[in-house]
Amino acid sequence: YLKKVWYQTIIGEEAFSGKQQWAFSAAADEELYKKSEQLITQTHTKPYFLTLQTISSHQPRHSPYGDTVEDTFRYTDDQLGNFYDKLKAEKFFDNGLLIIISDHRVRGKPKQEIVDMLGSTRPSKVMTTVVGTGITPNTTNNNLYQTIDFHFGLKELVSTGQVPVLSFINNPFDASTIQRDRWIYYCKYVDNTIGIIQNNKMIPQTQAPQNIQDFIAVYQEDQFKKNILQQSWSQIESG
């Protein structure tokens, strides 16, 4: 996937050989940030786009601070905070953007305050934080965005010349160009919940469009393979 979207350099687990392994048999976030700092130092004289995929906050809980939800998120927050402080000390934010985005919410029963705040839209909403050049501190943007909007928004922000983008995107970096008040899909195939969000409410759908059905089919197959693999790991670990 990363090759298909034109990443020029892909660094995987081979870069963390010899490091202690935690969740998903991967190095902890601290090691990821240290490697990122090295890359930033090497490339800081020219424009670059760097994507980090953190892992320490993900299930199964297993971090240097412990294995509870509180342990893993405290560790995750501490390491992200250290990374932010180092970027700030290096004056990264004078001409750079840090975008922190999640692929999904924390699974499990939510706190009541979250249910009260987000209502039926809770399962499909994640928080995104943007820090850096041109971003006013301590402001909140409550427009509806999808992760793909950041892809096209960044293309418009940093590219030169004519840049092809979808016509109906909500550009996170230009609030005056909101094109859409709908079509953020929420699909949870395990309980057959499918819907769109409009006017800050989830509107259930009796049947998803074909492209969403195709995605669910692929996801189900992928999850099946992961479950089988997880069972194999458990058998190996238990003896």
Image (spheres, grey):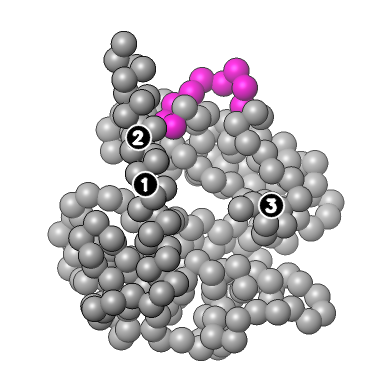
Q: Quadrant of residue 185?
A: bottom left
**Mark closer to the observer (1, 3):** 1
How far across and how far down the image is residue 222, in percent? 41, 48
- Seen at 39% across and 32% down, the residue is 229
Q: Quadrant of residue 46?
A: bottom right
Task: Give the residue at x 50% y 66%.
Answer: 147
Task: From the top left corner, tell me how far across and down residue 201 is, in percent.
Answer: 26, 80
Residue range (magenta):
16-24
Query: Which residue is at the far left?
Result: 112
Q: Residue at x 68, y 71 (%)?
A: 155
Front residue (pair 227, 59): 227
**Residue at the spot of label 1:** 223
Which amino acid, by three-letter code, is at mark 1?
A: Gln
Where residue 218 appears, x then y in whole percent?
A: 42, 56
Q: Nearer the viewer, mark 2 or mark 3?
A: 2
Residue 29 to residue 147: above or below: above
Total numbered circles: 3
The numbered mark at residue 3 is 3
Gap in Å between the C-alphas at discs 2 and 3? 27 Å
Q: How far is disc 1 from disc 3 in space, using C-alphas?
A: 23 Å
Question: Relative to 168, is 217 on the left or the right?
Answer: left
* Depth order, front residue of 153/10: 10
Q: How far is disc 2 from disc 1 in space, using C-alphas? A: 9 Å
Q: Which residue is mark 2?
A: 228
SS class, disc 1: helix
The amino acid type, in three-letter code, at marker 2 is: Ile
